[in-house]
DNA sequence: TATTGTTATACTCTATAACTATA
DNA sequence: TATAGTTATAGAGTATAACAATA
């Protein structure tokens, strides 16, 4: 197996481990990855109509209806009337939803510190440099998405 | 945002991009991630009873029934009688299944080369070093899994 | 006429529980 | 009695299409 191939496999393994770890963390809050993404966007953007969520998450309007239904039922968000468009509803974080997102933020910072603090400063720096290079390459190789800049 | 936090976010972004890319590739073969994992294990292990697939993929026996049903219907595998245990079936790759796995293998090698060849040799080396360190840290921080060695 | 969100319907992955056939 | 795999049932995420209310 070539060094390149091995490096790619290591990247995959890391991605999977991080994914599993995150999923376990979300499950303790009674959340799934998809529902968590909704909360995350609401935290960034404030109350938005479901249409906006469908666009930023790149899923169907129908799917958003289901995700918001579930988040309402579990107390993370509410549907509020839109002040000027009676067709739309504003999906709004509850206090519970806000506290949940804040708890992740903290957990993520702590995880990042626990992960990288033990690394030698020089090793960390060159790792991040390589990571940025690889990320740039992957972005180039992917279908050029006009939304990439907007999402970043 | 701290450098540690930023690095973690970059890792996430890379993981997501690689995941999306892979999913697109699988879709062109008419496959999903779960079904592809089945083919992958069959390629590594040869024909195995469904029970083995359930164990290695860490999913329920019921789930394996569904995945194998779908793979049989789409011509990637067949169910063959087990020579000594009449309760069991041996899930076996068809020629189509074998060629599909071989095509991925090639595609993965090409992708890895396209990704890393443009990197300076020194940058690649230190990136892989950092990657291995991070991977080790994540493994430590995760729940210590007795199967980790077996799966690797 | 176009847009927001819903209902209707369907497919995939996932799980547990009950059951059949076999060990 | 235990195991391999299926049927029955259910929940989550996803999609398209038809439809209602509103713009």
Image (tube, coloured by chain):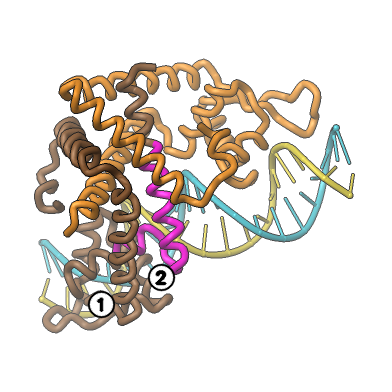
Chain colours: A orange, B brown, C yellow, D cyan
Describe residue D19's horizontal placement relative to residue B120 as left or right: right
Residue drawn at 31 percent across, 60 percent down: B108
Q: Quadrant of the N terminus of chain A?
A: bottom left
Residue drawn at 39 percent across, 49 percent down: B19
Q: Is residue B142 shown to the viewer in this render?
A: no
Q: Residues within 10 Å of mark 2 (few under 14, many from 20)?
A: some
What is the number of the mark on residue A106? none
Residue A35, position in %: x, y? 49, 35
For disc 1, the chain is B
Residue drawn at 44 percent across, 51 percent down: A141
Mark closer to the chain start, 1 or 2: 2
Q: Which region shows up in magenta?
A: B13-38
**Above or below, comparing residue A140 to residue B9 in the picture:** below
Residue B38, image quadrant? bottom left
Would residue B93 be counted in the magenta stretch? no
Q: Nearer the viewer, residue B3 or A3?
A: A3
Residue B104, image quadrant? bottom left
Residue B66, position in %: x, y? 37, 66
Q: Which residue is mark 2?
A: B70
Q: Which residue is mark 1?
A: B92
Q: Residues within 10 Å of mark 1 (few under 14, many from 20)?
A: many
For disc 2, the chain is B
Residue A87, position in %: x, y? 78, 34
Residue C15, position in %: x, y? 32, 50
Q: Is residue A142 shown to the viewer in this render?
A: yes
> SS of the residue at dot 2?
helix
Would residue B27 be counted in the magenta stretch? yes
> SS of the residue at dot 1?
strand
Q: Nearer the viewer, residue B118 or B142?
A: B118
């Amino acid at each position: 197996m070539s060094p390149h191939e091995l490096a790619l496999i290591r990247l995959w393994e890391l991605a999977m481990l991080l994914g599993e770890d995150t999923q376990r963390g979300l499950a303790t809050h009674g959340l799934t990855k998809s529902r968590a993404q909704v909360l995350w966007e609401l935290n960034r953007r404030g109350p938005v109509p479901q249409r906006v969520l469908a666009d930023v998450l790149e899923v169907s309007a129908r799917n958003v209806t289901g995700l918001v239904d579930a988040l309402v039922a579990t107390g993370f968000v509410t549907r509020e009337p839109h002040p000027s468009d009676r067709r739309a509803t504003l999906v709004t974080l509850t206090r519970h939803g806000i506290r949940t997102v804040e708890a992740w933020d903290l957990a993520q910072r702590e995880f990042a510190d626990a992960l990288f603090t033990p690394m030698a400063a020089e090793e960390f720096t060159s790792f991040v440099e390589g990571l940025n290079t690889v990320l740039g390459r992957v972005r180039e190789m992917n279908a050029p998405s006009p939304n990439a800049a907007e999402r970043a």
